[in-house]
């Protein structure tokens, strides 16, 4: 918990006063900002009755819902730290997070009941939260928020099997939302579809962006086709990762819906130039971005209506003095959007910094002559093969440019002669997989021979399903297969 307090008016209060009839949230029901404010007050009273202490961690294992979003704001007002986690995490990972966070309770919904009940901690079902408040409740503004409070603890994807826990203040989230809204305008009446999970910082950021702008956050029906939900809910904006964009572009309906939107924000993973060109030619209002969990989502983006040359990059930093490239090529960042630090077992929060106060992202990148950022991959995925440095993203970029390749991930597998060799997992879509000889020929036309994968492995059906591929899982699987083949 931060020792400094800075009281601010809740964005929900601001939206309810300025646009009381504006719809703030659409899920199982539609909520105006005034109705959201009344319901948040009920939840605040409910949580206060549970005697949570300031700074208590509340773990949430649930799919996005109206109750989830209302509970978020109520917990922020109670100065609790909300810890949304991926319901697909294995039980051992969830138990490890419980050991590290020591949550005051686990808030879960019915679809995740089995996961929640298997964990030794206090549990509260979403169904136990208060019902809808009627319109006769008190109309006083919500209590002030402490913008310096530790508001969220979000697991990083990382490249190891154990996620780090990044802690953000409300100030981090609100400042990031303000800068993002200044770049891609959002106004009352706009509808942003929540197509990314709330346990990911890109999803969480939309809670703040919509509230600040008085816009609508729309929750899709679980399992429904994305293009149909975009149309049904009248979405004007959406955040996508490259795989989602690729699938929508493969659908006539998807292209039709995206083309009519105000903004399609692309981030979360590297995107191939061929995908960007397809979106450009389809007249999709694309906005590229760069950010990470530790930066409270994007801190760099292209402008709406940017030329194709800009869209081949991640755009320019919102604050020119917030991003630099170190001598070793690593992207370093600083500023008000940078997280408070990593949560430590026992309750501490530590942010690693350089001697002059910058955070090293672990991403490699460079600026071009126009000041645009180009992200080149991760430092922590690089491995040495026969004395040569291998950056998996270089190989993945070539593979993902081939016909029918929807996703490709390259990992290192042990080798007695070379130390490590690359192995490639490939997910195919819409065509018969290319022969291995064709894959090798294409790779050799663009890359040196030492970067050639020793094996091309079909995408495993039971691979964890997240915004980014689970490199740790795929690496372990490839190593196991290599050992069996030895």
Image: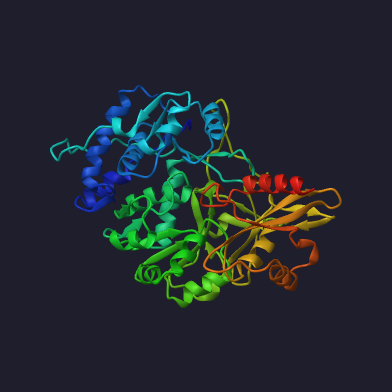
Residue displayed at 20% across by 50% down:
20
The image quarter in which residue 59 lies: top left
Q: Is residue 56 visible?
A: no
The image quarter in which residue 377 lies: bottom right
Above or below, 112 relative to 19: above
The residue lying toward the viewer, choosing from 367 and 25, is: 25
The residue lying toward the viewer, choosing from 204 and 250, is: 250
The residue lying toward the viewer, choosing from 68 and 3, is: 68
Where residue 305 sits in the image (x, y, percent)? 43, 73
Where residue 441 sits in the image (x, y, percent)? 73, 72
Above or below, 383 relative to 111: below
Where residue 221 sits in the image (x, y, percent)? 33, 51
The image quarter in which residue 321 lies: bottom right
Residue displayed at 44% across by 43% down:
171
Q: Is residue 1 toward the left or the right of residue 71 in the image?
A: right
* Residue sitting farthest toward the bottom: 281
Q: Is residue 105 visible?
A: yes
Q: How many marks?
A: 0
Where residue 135 sits in the image (x, y, percent)? 14, 40
């Amino acid at each position: 918990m931060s020792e400094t307090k800075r009281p601010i008016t809740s964005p929900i209060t601001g939206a309810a006063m300025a646009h009381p009839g504006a719809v703030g949230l659409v899920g199982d029901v539609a909520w105006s900002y005034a109705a959201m404010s009344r319901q948040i007050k009920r939840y605040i009273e409910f949580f206060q009755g549970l005697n949570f202490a300031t700074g208590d961690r509340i773990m949430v294992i649930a799919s996005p819902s109206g109750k989830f979003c209302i509970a978020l704001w109520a917990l922020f007002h109670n100065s609790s730290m909300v810890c949304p986690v991926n319901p697909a995490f294995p039980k051992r990972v969830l138990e490890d997070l419980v050991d590290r966070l020591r949550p005051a309770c686990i808030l879960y919904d019915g679809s995740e009941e089995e996961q929640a009940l298997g964990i030794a901690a206090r549990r509260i079902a979403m169904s136990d939260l208060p019902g809808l408040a009627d319109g006769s409740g008190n109309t006083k503004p919500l209590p002030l928020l402490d913008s310096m409070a530790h508001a969220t603890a979000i697991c990083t994807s990382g490249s190891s099997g154990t996620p780090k826990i990044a802690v953000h203040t409300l100030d981090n989230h609100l400042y990031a939302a303000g800068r993002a809204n200044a770049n891609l305008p959002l106004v009352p009446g706009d509808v942003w579809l929540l197509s990314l999970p709330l346990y990911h910082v890109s999803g969480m950021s939309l809670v703040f962006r919509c509230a600040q702008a008085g816009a609508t956050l729309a929750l899709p029906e679980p399992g429904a086709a994305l293009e149909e939900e975009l149309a049904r809910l009248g979405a004007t904006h959406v955040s996508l990762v490259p795989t989602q964009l690729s699938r929508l572009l493969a659908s006539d309906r998807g292209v039709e819906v995206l083309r009519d939107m105000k903004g399609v924000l692309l981030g979360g993973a590297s995107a191939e130039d061929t995908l960007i060109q397809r979106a450009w030619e389809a007249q999709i209002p694309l906005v590229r971005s760069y950010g990470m969990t530790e930066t409270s989502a994007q801190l760099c983006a292209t402008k709406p209506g940017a030329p194709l040359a800009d869209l081949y990059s991640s755009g320019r930093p919102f604050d020119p003095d917030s991003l630099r490239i170190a001598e070793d090529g690593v992207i370093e960042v600083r500023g008000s959007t940078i997280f408070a630090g990593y949560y430590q077992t026992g309750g501490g929060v530590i942010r690693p910094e350089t001697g002059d106060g910058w955070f090293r992202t672990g991403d490699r990148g460079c600026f071009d002559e126009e000041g645009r950022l180009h992200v080149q991959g991760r430092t922590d995925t690089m491995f040495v093969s026969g004395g040569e440095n291998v950056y998996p993203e270089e190989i993945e970029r070539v593979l993902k440019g081939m016909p029918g390749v929807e996703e490709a991930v390259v990992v290192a597998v042990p080798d007695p002669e070379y130390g490590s060799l690359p192995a490639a997992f490939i997910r195919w879509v819409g065509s018969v997989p290319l022969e291995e000889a064709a894959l090798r020929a294409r790779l050799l036309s663009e890359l040196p021979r030492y970067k050639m994968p020793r094996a091309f492995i079909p995408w495993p059906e039971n691979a964890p399903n997240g915004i980014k591929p689970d490199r740790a899982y795929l690496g372990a699987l490839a190593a196991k297969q290599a050992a069996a083949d030895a």
